[in-house]
Image: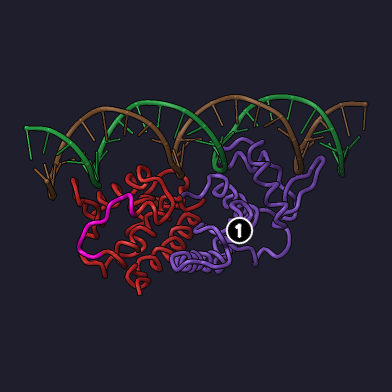
Chain colours: A purple, B red, C brown, D green
DNA sequence: CAATTACGGACTTCGTGTGTCTATGATAAC
DNA sequence: GTTATCATAGACACACGAAGTCCGTAATTG
């Protein structure tokens, strides 16, 4: 039960893109150097963020990645869901519709965490 | 990023011990049948609960497992910590003392979930 | 065309969760 | 004391996913 390292990289990358990046797209090599990760690995993480609609990419020379949409709206939960998926952390007695009491408690606990992550926007940390 | 099945089994077992069990200890075979798990596997889970001080065990004939201490005090978090450990869900930039801003947000989100799990006692579900 | 950059699939490695099997130790009943 | 019952612990096997790497392809700029 751990958040993956990929989620960590994604959060740092997004924060960097939101805080520093101007209009120009940023290449993956530059992003990778900042965190000491290989560019090829980070590119797969960025592709997930693209598919989630959080960033947009531009191929070719002077290409790279740029935040898509309003920067103010991007929350921690958006990025975590893009990397970890949206399925529940707790799987129980099999059928999903009739949830046992334990399952209900676990779901509401998870929801408490998600609410916190949803209310915290990345731009709050970009001072 | 999932809770382990072992945590699921532990929660159901503890709920059963708290709700149904009288003073007599309950054998692992009986507990295993209720959930369709092998007794040998469930015994390792129960051993963790013993080491965490949540249940006590009795060897020999008519032995088994029994809830230790006050049943009213046992929370979801106690059991989860016994199975999953107490380390943070999110590991970041390496050093633990100087936490980056992202790390701080993740920790407080995790804490929101833990508070919920800490405040919910198992006996609340044993009607 | 050539250089740059993202995208995608295949692949390896490693750790951990999930179990099983078996031996050992403790206790109660006979 | 002997035997049956029960917990405990270690070794082992297996599957799956996380974490990367490598390489080929596609797109865009100059």
| Quadrant in the rendering for residue A69 | bottom right
User: Relative to residue B77, is residue A125 drawn left or right?
Assistant: right
Q: Residue at x 64, y 57 (%)?
A: A18
* Residue that extends furthest to the bottom in the rendered view of this protein: B127
Residue closer to the observer: B37 or A54 = B37
The x, y position of residue A99, in whole percent, is 51, 67
Residue closer to the observer: A76 or B22 = B22
Q: Residue at x 33, y 44 (%)?
A: B44
The x, y position of residue D10, in whole percent, is 30, 30
B26 in the magenta segment: yes
Q: Residues within 10 Å of mark 1 (few under 14, many from 20)?
A: few
Q: Residue at x 34, y 67 (%)?
A: B122
Q: Quadrant of the C terminus of chain A?
A: bottom right
The x, y position of residue B58, in whole percent, is 19, 50
Vertical relation: D10 (above or below) A71: above
Q: Residue at x 40, y 63 (%)?
A: B114
User: Relative to residue B109, is residue A95 drawn left or right?
Assistant: right
Q: Which residues are magenta?
A: B22-30
| Residue A36 in view in this figure | no
Residue closer to the observer: B96 or B117 = B117
Residue named by callout 1 = A86
| Residue A41 in view in this figure | yes
**Label tally:** 1
SS for dot 1: loop
> Overall secondary structure of the magenta stretch?
loop
B36 in the magenta segment: no
Residue closer to the observer: B67 or A44 = B67
Q: Chain of mark 1?
A: A
The x, y position of residue B2, in whole percent, is 50, 52
User: Relative to residue B126, is residue A22 drawn left or right?
Assistant: right
């Amino acid at each position: 039960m751990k958040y993956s390292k990929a989620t960590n990289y994604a959060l740092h990358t997004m924060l960097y893109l939101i805080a520093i990046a101007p209009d120009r797209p940023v290449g993956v090599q530059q992003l990778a150097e900042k965190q000491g990760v290989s560019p090829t690995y980070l590119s797969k993480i960025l592709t997930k963020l693209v598919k989630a609609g959080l960033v947009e990419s531009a191929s070719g020379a002077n290409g790279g990645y740029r935040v898509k949409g309003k920067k103010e709206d991007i929350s921690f939960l958006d990025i975590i869901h893009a990397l970890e998926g949206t399925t529940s952390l707790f799987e129980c007695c099999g059928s999903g519709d009739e949830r046992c009491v334990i399952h209900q408690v676990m779901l509401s606990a998870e929801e408490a965490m998600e609410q916190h992550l949803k209310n915290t926007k990345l731009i709050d940390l970009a001072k």
